[in-house]
Amino acid sequence: MKRGTVVWVDLNDATPPEMGKIRPGIVVSGTEHNESLNTVVVVPTSSIEPEIWPLRLAVGRFAGKASFAVIPGIRQVRKGRLRGALGELSDDQLSALDECLDAYLR
């Protein structure tokens, strides 16, 4: 699984304020690690606006809706929760997401 891939991910069994249901998520763990581990790290997306830097970043349209990466929702998931790819972020979008993650996690 390549870093920056947007996938359907099943986040069910979540308890608020965790994000649940099947929704697009962005794989942010490293491609090399993703090849050998049974899990990946994803940032879920939401169609709820607006962009709130560094907590919510506009990342384009996926599944027919405007999508916003929800940085505080970052989580590790089993690959069995992935339901198929929707696309990939551009290099610029992935760099912007990295900036948000860096600002949020420091």
Image (cartoon, rainbow, N blue to C red):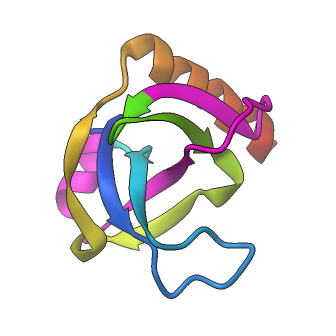
> Residue visible at 22% across and 75% down?
80
Q: Dividing the image into 4 quarters, which one contains the C terminus?
A: top right
Front residue of 38 and 88: 88
Q: Residue 65 magenta-drawn? A: no
Inspect this view and state whether residue 37 appears: no
Indicate left or right for 70 with 25 as reference. Answer: right
Using the image, determine if residue 39 lies above or below residue 73: below
Indicate left or right for 53 with 71 as reference. Answer: right
Q: Position of residue 76 (x, y in %)?
A: 47, 67
Inspect this view and state whether residue 55 appears: yes
Indicate left or right for 16 with 106 as reference. Answer: left
Q: Which residues are magenta?
A: 31-60
Q: Position of residue 35 (x, y in %)?
A: 18, 54
Q: Residue 47 magenta-drawn? A: yes
Using the image, determine if residue 8 lies above or below residue 64: below
> Residue visible at 66% across and 25% down?
99
Q: Position of residue 32 (x, y in %)?
A: 25, 45
In which quarter of the view is residue 18 placed? Answer: bottom right
